[in-house]
Image (tube, grey):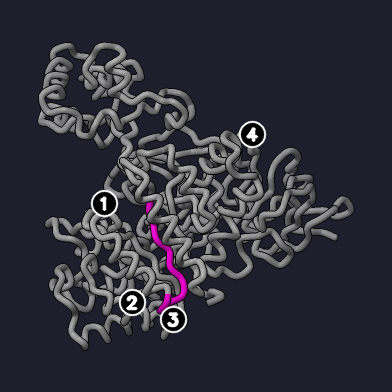
Amino acid sequence: MAHDLIIRNGMVVDGTGRDGYVADVSVDGDRITAIGDLAGEVGAAEIDASGQVVSPGFIDMHTHLDAQVAWDPLLTSSSWHGVTTVLIGNCGVTFAPVAQADQAYLAEMMESVEDISRDAILQGLPWDWTTYPQYLDSVQRLRPALNMVGFVGHSAVRYHVMGERSLGDEPPTANELARMREAVAEAIAGGAVGFSASRTPLHTVPDGRSIPGTFAGIDEYREIARGICEGGGGIFQSVNDFVNQPDLEQTLLETMLADVGSILFSAGVGNDDSKRLELLAAFVERTRGAGGTVTLAAPTRSGGTLCGLTQVLPVRGRRWRALLDLPTIADRVEALGDAATRADLIAEGKKNGLWYDPSHIYPLGTGEEPDYCESGGMSVAALASAQGVHPIELIVERLLASEGRELFNAWLFNRRHDLTPDLLAIDRVYPGLSDTGAHAGQICDADMPTHFLTYWHRDREQFSLAEAVRRLTSFPAGVLRLADRGTLAVGSFADINVFDVQRLASRYPEFVYDFPNGAGRFKLGSRGYAATLVNGQVVAEESVNTGARPGRVIREFAR
C-alpha cells in the first residue's frame, strides 16, 4: 500500500503518558492512517526516525501572535521548537471586536501591554473585520504555518461597548452588560475557544491607566459567563493580581469555574518566599473536585528581560540612550571601545545604577546555547564582587569581549528557581508561559517546550519522557477541547514531531530587524528537531522552515 508519508523506526511517544515503543507512522492527507510495522508499505516521502522520538506536535497555550501572523505567517520562533498549535488572545488584549475608529487604540493598547509595535500592528494587519469571528476569518486568509486557536479579550469587548468609561472602575449599565454578553456569545459561537481577562495593574494603556476590565466586578464576569455559555461554552482565561488581592482573585476564579466549567490562569512562584506556591497549590487542590477543569500555566525557568546592546540597555541614562541610537550592534561596540566614551558610560552607570537589581541579572554566556544559570550560576552582582569591580564595569567588559553578542537575563519572575520544581510538579500545571509574540525586543521564550524537555526531563529527570510529552500535547489539547489532536492515533490529525532528545537544544537568542518598519525582535532557533508536521505537511526541518503553510484556525471544539 502506498502512503503520502511514512515515518520509519521511531520511538513513538504518543502523548497519552504511556511508555514509548518503536513503530512506523503513515500519513495520508492531513491524518495519521497507520501506526505499526509498515515494512511492506511505501511512502511517496519517507523520514528515517531511527534513534529519534516521534511525538504529537506541541501546543503553546500562552502566546500573543495575534498580530505577528500577518507579517510572519511561518510563526517563527514557535515553528522551530516543535509547536504545531498556538493559542492567541491571552491576557484580555485582542484586536476584536473593534469599530474602525478604535483600531489605533487597540494597537496602542497591545503595544503598551505586550510591547508589540503599534505601527507594525496597524500597517501589518489587514483590519478587515469588526467582530471576533471576522477576525478569525482574516487570520485564516493569512494562511499560517501552524494551527491557531483564539480567545476573545475583555479589554476589546469592554472598550467596544463602554468606550473611554471602560478604563475606570465604573460598572457598566444594564444595557452595556447585555451588549458585552452578546459580543462574547457571538465570539464563542463564531469560533473563539473562550474569553480572556487581565486583572494585574501592570497591564496599562499608554497614558498609564490600567487596561479595560482590570477592576471589573464579579457581577460583570458572571454576565460574561452567561455569554460564554450562550455561545456554546468555553474557557475563562485570566492573569490575576495575586500580589495585592489574592482572596478576591481566588473568589473570581472559583465563581467562573462554577459558571463556565473551565478556567486557565497564569502564575509563577513568588519572588521572595514560598507563599505564592502554597496559595496556588492549595487553590488547585481545593477546586479539584468542583466539577470543572482548572489549569495553571507556569513558566519553566527564571527570566523576564534580556538586556545588552540590543533594545534594553543595562543602564537608563542619556549617554547610554545615545549609544542605542547608533544603527548597528557593531557601531555600538565600536563606540564602547573608545576610552573616553566608555568612561562616560561607566560613570553614568555608577551614578544611576543598573536598570534592575544586579543580584537578579545573570549573564547568558557566549556559547551556541544560552546559559540560563539554573544550576549554580552567579549573578552579575556576585561576579562583580568576586572580581572587585562595579557591576556596570563587569557588564561593559563582557560586552566588549563578546563584541556585543552577550546578553544578560534579568530575573523579573520565578526568581526562586528552587521552587520551580514544586510548581511544575502540580498535576494541573501546564509547563509554558512563553508569551511568544509579545515583548519581542525584550525576550524570547518560544523555546519553553524545548527547555522543558531538555532541562526538566533530560537533565534533571524530574519528568519521564512520556509524561513530559503528555504535558506538552494531550494535556493542553484536553484543556482546549481539541478534537483529534494531542495524541498519535490512527485518524488523528498529523501534527507530529520527530526529534532527537539527546541533541535537542535552544540556540542563542539572535536580535533581528524583520518586523514592519524595521522594528527589532529576538528570534530563537533550535537543534534536534528533524521534522515538524502540521496537518500532514512538513513545516520545519532543523530550525529551517520549508515554506509550507498548512495551519488552520481551529474553531470547533468538544465543548
Measured in 3D between alpha carbons, the distance from the residue under mark 1 to the one under mark 2, in whole angstroms, is 23 Å
Q: Residue furthest right?
A: 40
Q: Quadrant of residue 193?
A: bottom left
Q: Is residue 309 visible?
A: yes
Q: Quadrant of the N terminus?
A: bottom right
Residue at image location 25% in from the left, 19% down from the top: 396
| Label 3: how many Cα within 10 Å (few below 14, some 14–19, many 20+) | many
Q: What residue type is labelled 1?
A: Ser
Task: Name the N-terminal-most of marks 3 and 4.
Answer: 3
Q: Nearer the viewer, mark 2 or mark 4?
A: 4
Label placed on residue 473? none
Image x and y of residue 535, in percent: 61, 61
| Label 2: how many Cα within 10 Å (few below 14, some 14–19, many 20+) | many
Q: Nearer the viewer, mark 2 or mark 3?
A: 3
Q: Is residue 81 left or right of residue 531?
A: left
Q: Which amino acid does label 4 sit on?
A: Gln
Which residue lies under the disc numbered 2? 131
Q: What element carries label 2?
A: loop
Which residue lies under the disc numbered 3? 189
Which residue lies under the disc numbered 4? 502
Measured in 3D between alpha carbons, the distance from the residue under mark 3 to the one under mark 4, in whole angstroms, is 44 Å
Residue at image location 50% in from the left, 36% down from the top: 506
Measured in 3D between alpha carbons, the distance from the residue under mark 2 to the one under mark 3, in whole angstroms, is 12 Å
Task: Name the N-terminal-most of marks 1 and 3.
Answer: 1
Q: Give the range drawn in magenta.
A: 258-267
Task: Name the N-terminal-most of marks 1 and 4.
Answer: 1
Q: What element carries label 1?
A: loop
Q: Which of marks 3 and 4 is in front?
A: 4
Which residue lies under the disc numbered 1? 117
Image x and y of residue 179, in percent: 27, 84
